[in-house]
Each structure stands twice: as C-alpha cells, then as structure tokens.
Image: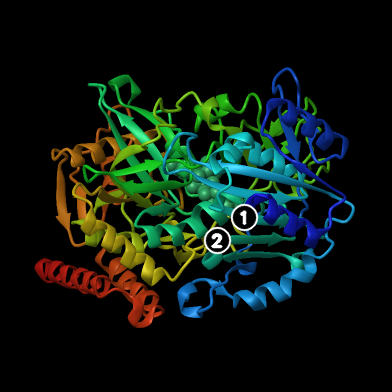
Amino acid sequence: MATPLEKWVEEAAALTKPRQIVWCDGSKQEYHRLLEQALAENVFLPLNERSYPNCYLHRSDPSDVARTEQVTFICTREKSDAGPTNNWMVPEEAKAKVRPLFDGVMRNRTMYVIPYLMGPVDSPFSRVGVEVTDSLYVVLSMMIMTRAGKKAIERLGRSDDFVPGLHSLGDLHPERRYILHFPEEKLIWSIGSGYGGNALLSKKCFSLRIASWLARQQGWMAEHMLILGMEDPSGQVTYIAGAFPSACGKTNLAMMVSALEPMGYRVWTVGDDIAWMQIDADGYLRAINPEAGFFGVAPGTSRQTNPNVMEALRRNALFTNVGLTPDREPWWEGINGEPPPGTLNWRGERWTRSRGPVAHPNSRYTVPAHQTPSISPHWEDPQGVPISAFIFGGRRARVAPLVYESRDWQHGVFVGATMASETTAAATGAVGITRRDPMAMLPFCGYNMADYFAHWLAIGQRITHPPRIFHVNWFRRGADGKFLWPGFGENARVLKWIIERVRGNGRAIETPIGYVPTHDALTLDGLPISRATLEELLRVDPTDWASELDDIQKFFKRFGNRLPAALWQEHQNLADRLSQASLARK
Ligand code: GTP
Ligand code: SPV
Ligand code: MN
C-alpha cells in the first residue's frame, strides 16, 4: 500500500503532470549527478576549480532576487487567525486561484521529490518536510540547507506527520507568483519564484510560518534567531539566541571571530537563522538549529568582517547573484577593494560603475554548516543547547542604544514586540524605511501576532530559568551619518557584558528603557573609541523615546483587543518611567 507521502506525491504529480519524477536520496553521488545536469542546463556555472573547488554560481531571473512579502499569504478559515500583519486568503479561494497555475506546469519538466529532516537526525525535536519542485537550483540548495533524502524517509516511515510543500518555478512572472501557507493543514504552495525564502520551502515557509503555528499549539517556540555559544576564559560556554530582521547581522554574529579571543572569549556557532526551542524537564529553554547549512548575505562579507565564513566558502559552496571575476572567482561589494578589470556583474554583464553594484545587494552564499571553523561541537546535540539570554536587535540610525537589558520577562517581551528596523534588500520594496518588526518575525509569523505575543508571555510563565532579554543596535549613526560602533568581531565586547549580566555581575545603570552598561562596564581594551562616541552609543534620548511611544501605540492599536493587556501595561509603565525621568531632570 502506498504511504501517505507517496499518495501526496501522486496527487502533486496528477496536478502538475511532470515528464518524470525523481526521488532524491540525498547521497553524494546524487548531488554530483544533479550538478552535472545543472551545469549542462546552465542553472549553475563552475567557479575556479583550484581556488573554489566544487563551488558554483547561479544567476537568478533579475525579477526574482529576494523574498516577496506582498504575494506571501497565510490562508486560514478565519481572517483574524492570520492577523493584521499578514496577507490573507480563505484556503479554498487561494487554492481555486492558484491551482490553475500548477495545472500541467511541469509537463516538460522533471519533478524532484525531496524528503527532508529539519533538525539533527537523532533529535526528538526534528521534523520531516517534503518539497516537490521543478528547480534544480532548489534541489541542490536543499541538499545543503537540510538533511535530505534517506534520513528523512527513514524517520518518517509510514507516518503522515510531514509538512508537504509544492513548488514550481511556473513562468517566473511576478504577477503569477504566490507563496501560500495553509497552517490548518500544514501545507505550503509556492509558484513563480526560484529565490531563497520563496522557494526553499524548508526555511521560512516551514521552519517559521508553519512551525510557529505548530509551536503555539504544542507549547514550544519557532523563532527567527541565530544561536551561539560564548566561551569565557574558564572554558564555560553560555548560549545566546538572537533575533534580528533579515540582513541585520544574525549570520555575522553567530560566526564572529571575537575581538576578545586573546582574553579567552570565543564564539561557537550553533545556528544562523532559525531556532526551535522547547522547555526541558529542568525548566531551561533548549534550542536546536533545524537547518544544516547557511544561506548568507554575501555583500559586506570579507576576511576582516567574517573570516570564519570566508574560510567555509572556499569549497562546496553555491553562490547566487554575485559577480564573477576573470579568474572565475566570486566577487561582491566589500569582499576586497575594487573589482578586477573584466569582472561580470550579477546579471552576467561586463561591469561598469554606471551599471550599479557588481553583486546584487541580496546576493547570497549557500554552504554546509559544518564547514565553518567556528561550528560548535554541540550544534547537532539532539537535546539542543540551553539558552541563557535572548538578544533582539535591529538597524536603528537613532533611538536604540548599543545595548540594554530588559527589566524582566514581561518587559522583555514588550522590548521584542516593539522592535523596529530599517528595511533591507532581503525583501523586495523600499530599503531603509523604519518599520516595526516584532521579534524579527513580522514576515514570518504564521498566525495573528497578538496571539504570538500572548504565546511568548505564556511561555515565560512556564520556564523556571527564563533567558534574560537584551536589545542591541550595531547600527546607530553619528552626526556624520557613519556607524558609531565598529560591529562584527567587536560585538564580542557586548556579548561579554551580556554573559556577565546573566551571571549577576555586569555593571549597569537603570534607565527608563531598561539597564544600560555603565561607562566602564564594557571591555574596550584595544578599541580606539572616544568617550564621546561611547556616550552617544549608550545615550537614551527622552525625546526620541517619547515619539517611539507614540509609534508603538499606533502599532499596538492595529491588533485591537486581541493584544495582550500586559503589553499595554508595559507601554504605560515605559511612559511613566520616561515622564518621571524628565521630571527628575527639571
Ligand atoms: P538574513 O540571512 O537575511 O536573515 O540576514 P542576517 O540577519 O543573517 O544578516 P547578516 O549577518 O548576513 O548581515 C547582513 C549585512 O549586515 C551584511 O552586509 C553584513 O556585512 C552587515 N553586518 C552584519 N553585522 C554587522 C555589524 O555588526 N555592523 C555593521 N555595520 N554591519 C554588519
Ligand atoms: C531572510 O530574508 O531572512 C533570509 C533569506 O534568511 S531568505 O531565505 O530568502 O528568507
Ligand atoms: Mn534570515
């Protein structure tokens, strides 16, 4: 008898009518066979075999270079279950609209079936998904980003507990592009895009949008978070999970070479984008990284900013929409000086300054996680790692200081729920607009965010040892428009303060927004930073925060009476503390 998986694949094939169906086993031989085919079809171009062995370049359709939030939908029976921040359609209407686009779409194409496991092979918290796709780029990327093939099939057996994802490139026309989620039936449909988060359905679609829905039902958390371990000179490792919006520094923080390494502080990478977390029997929150690879932003990555990933990228990596030098090496802005003469841009044209950047601002690399020199010995621990602190952060030219700590869990949830950040090239649309992006989940929460906040509050009630909650901002700018903080490896100085706070000995002053390091609390040895700059970095400006309060109020009002009262209470408390502080100054 056919298994539930086989049945679903048959249905998908009946709809899309492929020329043939190929089941992926996830083996090395298969990867190489599919790569040969991708090279023959020009889906990939080979890079320099000496300097970048087994590395390839993919150029996507120029209209298909980033996630498209405007055509991403949460399809629930009730609109209120998707909430005011998601695009919504009734499931039946969404299917009626998009089914015709899938009908016969694979007629002259091969359908690849990719069973995959999210999470370590022997972890009780791992889950199975299956993607069918007609894109070789997707297949090869999924082989790096997930544990694909046999491992997943073995885990699934005859069970029907998997998240099916139907994907087709369609005709790549932006008007016929839809990314649909049906959380009530744990189903994903995606058509018209071959790009990253739109097409690698394991990532944002399953591990965040569907998983966040499941997590709320089942009492766990699925978050857009990096996971790292900070080792201190005694060898003790403190694990931290951090939520920053897309292209705001998760991968770089998770893989940093700590500026404090000479003092014995180093960073171990567990994950760079997604954390699945459960409360364990001892009352700690434990996190696994469901992914097996990193899909990272290329521009800005260099030997100086992120030597770990530069090392990892020298073999078995896929590059998307970067430039190509005459030596057939990948090139992007920030990698190293000027592009060599004769460099091709991301569209494959000979680069000239007037053609804009060499690499697309959202160009990416895809690389197996285990290749990074900083990979934690515990990154595949089946039970996950215990989280002692959460960090929320965004790109804020003003307002948010370098770092502050929330007062308690409820206040920390308020800090996360009111995060804001300037938009980036990771999604289509204007760049640099400040928007509220709660917990960096605005584009990824599969249900009403008011209920999501309530879930966070409820989780706090259940953890005996809740992580302490911090907020950071590496992107504050001075009057000259330049970043005040050097960032990257220097962020270790902030992590050091965070782990000191966790252990009860970091120095801080209480401000209306929370606890800010005293001027002598951060270890700044060897960093040429003036007292004035440090003061500016740590400054809490009452005028800025007063307008922040107004904007938060507007945002909260969108959720009507579904917003937990505790968050309105925190809003009021912040207002009270700010007005007390301004009275005290008078
Ligand atoms: P997604 O993969 O889209 O989720 O992005 P991410 O959050 O992992 O961001 P990533 O670490 O890839 O960084 C995005 C961009 O910000 C890159 O161009 C980095 O070079 C830059 N960046 C990262 N960390 C810092 C920092 O500490 N300071 C500054 N100034 N830039 C940074
Ligand atoms: C993000 O945008 O947060 C990413 C890239 O990590 S994508 O996979 O396209 O979502
Ligand atoms: Mn991301």
Image side of residue 579 versus residue 260, left or right: left
Q: Where is residue 289 in the image (x, y as percent from the top left)?
A: 45, 40
The label on residue 164 is 1
Q: Say whether marks 2 and 1 touch (CB < 8 Å).
A: yes
Viewer-proximal residue among 458 and 511: 458
The amino acid type, in three-letter code, at marker 2 is Lys
Q: Residue at x 78, y 52 (%)?
A: 61
Furthest residue in direction bottom, as rendered: 560
Q: How crowded is mark 1: few (under 14 residues within 10 Å), some or many (20 or more)?
A: many
Q: In this view, does 217 lie above or below 220?
A: below
Q: Position of residue 115 (x, y in %)?
A: 63, 44
Secondary structure under tag 1 reads: strand
Q: How crowded is mark 2: few (under 14 residues within 10 Å), some or many (20 or more)?
A: some
Secondary structure under tag 2 reads: loop
Image side of residue 325 versus residue 235, left or right: right
Q: Position of residue 57 (x, y in %)?
A: 74, 36
Viewer-proximal residue among 477 and 89: 89
Query: Can residue 63 be seen at all in this image of the molecule?
Result: no
Residue at image mark 2: 186
Furthest residue in direction front, as rendered: 1
The amino acid type, in three-letter code, at marker 1 is Pro
